[in-house]
Amino acid sequence: VGPGPGSATAAGLSAPPVMAAPLEHENQVFLDLFHQDGLVICARGLGIDRILLRFLRLYCEPASLVLVLNTSPAEEEYFIDQLRSDGVVHLPRRVTNEITSNCRYEVYTQGGVLFATSRILVVDFLTDRIPSNLITGILVYKAHRIIESCQEAFILRLFRQKNKNGFIKAFTDNAIAFHTGFCHVERVMRNLFVRKLYLWPRFHIAVNSFLEKHKPEVVEIHVSMTPAMLTIQTSILDILNVCLRELKRYNPALEVEDLSLENAIGKPFDKTIRHYLDPLWHQLGAKTKSLVQDLKILRTLLQYLTQYDCVTFLNLVESLKATEKAFGQNSGWLFLDSSTSMFVNARARVYRISDDKISKKSKVSEKMDIKERKELKRELVLESNPKWEALREVLKEIESENKNSEDLGGPGQVLICASDDRTCAQLREYIIAGAEALLMRLYNKTFGKDERAGEEWIKDRKAVKSKGNARSDKGPQAKKAKVEASSKQNKIMKKQDLTLTQMMGKTEEENIEEEMEGYKELSSSEEISIEETKPEDFHLNLASDAYYGIFKTPLTIIHPLQGCSDPYALTRVLHEVEPRYVVLYDAELTFVRQLEIYKASKPGKPLRVYFLIYGGSTEEQRYLTVLRKEKEAFEKLIREKASMVIPEEREGRDETNLDLVRDSTSATVSTDTRKAGGQEQKSVQQTIIVDMREFRSELPSLIHRRGIDIEPVTLEVGDYILTPDICIERKSISDLIGSLNNGRLYSQCISMSRYYKRPILLIEFDPSKSFSLTSRGSLHQEISSNDITSKLTLLTLHFPRLRILWCPSPHATAELFEELKQNRSQPDAAIAMAITADSEIVPESDKYNPGSKDFLLKIPGVNAKNCHVLMNHIKSISELVTLSQDKLSEILGNAVNAKQLYDFIHKSYAEAISQGKTKR
Amino acid sequence: MPVSWPARVTAASSGSREGAVLGELPPGSEASTVPPAASGDSDPCPTLKPGAKSNCIIVSARQRGNPILKFVRNIPWEFGEIVPDYVLGQSTCALFLSLRYHNLNPNYIHERLQLLGKTYAVQVLLVQVDVKDPHQALKELAKMCILADCTLILAWSPEEAGRYLETYKAYEQKPADLLKEKVDQDFLSIVTDCLTSVKSVNKTDALSLLSTFGVSHLLPIRVQTGPCHC
């Protein structure tokens, strides 16, 4: 399994002592970027947030106006908190939709650092609500996401068009993202309008030598898996391999390199495979689809194997088998030899079947009820996790060291990190209650009281039948002797049962509590009160609420590495707790690096890191793969950087950058370019009116790119107005389904056809998904009114003038829009905005006032057929009220309808309320 | 005579096509409307004028052998002399186009659309997407449909195309209730729904208005916006 684990820490965990806050290499990153704009790609966990923070600190003053793009609310909060604790006065502010458009200009002119929602910024740039010339610059976080069509790229383009002096500085710590695709980094830099690329891998000489000086003490503990675990792991890997081979056989087009076993155990594999398969998902056979599903299950199995205890694993395995029985879904791997061995071993970790079942039978059936008997036949093994033992050892060592730690200034705090909440909760219970109690509780929860245990048991028996038979051969002679022995055993077992139930009572309480508190800080239930003081005291006022406290003195807590709502929770905890000992129950690259930096920023403080890992396991392999991937990505980036040709005008500070020239001829690389020389200059500037809400999608950016002006306004009817006649309602597939179901599309179509000559429904597909409305084989035998195709049919029948556009991607849409606008006049924003119920309607659509018609149609007794008759008879709705019931039935020609209508109009509110009450 | 699906397909199925088509017909469909197997291209069926009432889909003879007919199972169909490919109701018709065919004969659909003119209220251009890279062709068709007042419908398989034909015929008289927002059938919901159809009234307004006035007192408020062309 790859290079030795020694190298794992060498590359990931080697670092440091001395120096205060800004670290040497950080200074250099900062200064480089400060002097010349560029994109910084830094290794994961090496503190890209700290660098951004320094820039924020620099610009937190009213004299500058700096925008920060691409941060999440949690990150913004973290940055603001940090700056506040640094004593910064002019704190960054957020521009969200809570600030009304009128106030925004004022906010912008007040200066400082602003975190702004991209959608708002786009609109403000387009409408010149933001004083572009006053902007000092833009900081882009998570810059690897800046692809051409995204909002942020649009903002940067608009910024550069209007402001030639401001800076653009971009940050990312995701080097692996640049590993895919052709010239990815160059395209991102082009979108960012930067010429410089700064690479800061972990193996950078400055980083490496600096961190080397501040190395924490590292203890690597290679835990070996139990034989059963090893066998299971081998079996799962076997099955994975078979599935991968099958997958390749069915889809020869898939890139072989990405489908290696090494990648398959890594975390991003699901994404990779979906990335390849999604565009052709509707063409795939059932076999491939189920293989993809199986791969996912197998990966989960692998993860559960090392992450959780034997009972949880067995439960998962059994439920797989049960679903297979129930639904008959599986692509055959359950019948492989390897899977049998997996099942056998998974069970062997939990219980053993006692040998003497035959001899017991007679006695047992008399005395006990059947269930109990079945229970008895299982002899619980409940294999404990090897890592747990290792953790206990480590904690013991820390404890003994803490006892004579006067020279270090008292006992050191302990931070234990495990990957997720579930593991953390288990570890906590393990440390407090012990392995046996934990496993017993889990066993009882999953198998104990479950009625299925009986069936399970029968299945088990089948599985071990051969064994049983072999033994029963020698049975007859041994029988008698065993009877006595078994009766003794029974007694013991009974006892055990008793304790079990007792415990169950307690643990159940615990369970409920746990669930109630959302698996957070568990208030002490009676039996946990070993060393804990009151739980109230134990709320540590830590920044994160995701931690699990164990002991108060010395403070020992468990914190999950992933799955916290606040991505900086662990960082905050680390800095607040200031542990002397960190136990990494699970390895994660980012946090390992973070520890290095933490150590380096607190020179002189001792830090010891215990690294628990299963030697030769997929867990170890996964960690090493991540390390290797990042290293490869950086090496590729370094090569690319060396050969990169960057045009002088890239930054767009003068007029020569072609990306900023908004002309359709430069944007389309089609036959047009060749004709460009002879093309006549268009005299009219093309304009499209776009509804505010549409700025969430990438379409406006792409339209703008084609040289068409965009006017953002709030439209009541339609999303895009191309010409005075053409109004377009854009729907993604999910929108389309939703709005066909909830009636919104119907009313949108009504208003579109009322006010525009050419109402158009645009169905836009996601380019990364399949270009198809229904998937293969999903058609029913009969016409079903629930099908989206049926509803679409009905819609077109009711709106004969409604045209439908089907666009495979936003790019295609933008192109089509441009062509639809050719030789047609420009729309007027003022008119489009004013279109509401009161404006003039398209002549041929209706000769009646649409508002009144809508109103009448909603009244009971009026329907599409008699509505016009009614409207011809009355001058206004007020006249309707004066009519008698007889007169109404004369007009409507139907006494029932007339009565409904009359009753409705003349029913009083009080009556209605009382009626409603009696109904209830 | 031009056909709108690949010539290959027609040739392949020509031998047994009648049988195949017949075999797929629902047992309940009128025997008289089924063209005799011997009939060649000259159709002996009673001539049906477009627009005449019929509970069948009327299929132009040029669609003979089109695989999508195999998937029109829930609605009876018959051949007739018509200008479009399919007549799906009194005011609904459809032209069928396979993109594979279109790429070979880009002018075909032009001519058909010109011939059709604007005879029907709903004119569907039913396109079967059966090529790998349909985007350029689809863009051209989209523009064409806007100019020719056609409704563009895409299907990705003959099953889906057949289903669209069935659905158009089956839903010919169907009201739009299915598409509308569902309103509870008690008095309050109806009144609220009714009142909120006026632009400036929201749900809370509607309730407070109602508690103050009865419906009969409320309605005259709309005097100014009453029917204008009555």
Image (cartoon, coloured by chain):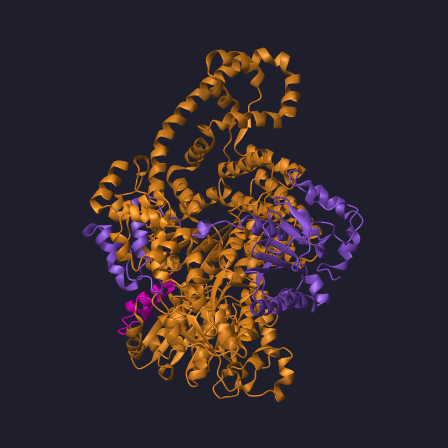
Chain colours: A orange, B purple
Q: Is residue A720 left or right of residue A627?
A: left
Percent across and percent down for residue A236 are 61, 43
Above or below B102: residue B180: above
Q: Residue furthest toward the left?
A: B212
Above or below A196: residue B185: above
Percent across and percent down for residue A392 are 43, 43
Q: Magenta includes A538?
A: no
Percent across and percent down for residue A183 are 60, 72
Residue B76 visible, this orientation:
yes
Magenta residues, start to end? A73-98
Res B106 quadrant in image: bottom right
Identify which residue, A540 or A246, lies in the foreground: A246
Percent across and percent down for residue A582 are 41, 54
Kindly identify the residue that appears in the image at 21 percent across and 53 percent down: B217
Identify which residue, B140 or A75, lies in the foreground: B140
Identify which residue, A252 or A578, lies in the foreground: A252
Res A83 quadrant in image: bottom left
Q: Magenta includes A74?
A: yes
Residue A214 visible, this orientation:
no
Kindly identify the residue that appears in the image at 31 percent across and 74 percent down: A104
Identify which residue, A604 or A794, lies in the foreground: A794
Quadrant holding the C terminus of chain A: top left
Res A679 quadrant in image: bottom right
Above or below A713: residue A646: below
Q: Is residue B1 left or right of residue A268?
A: right
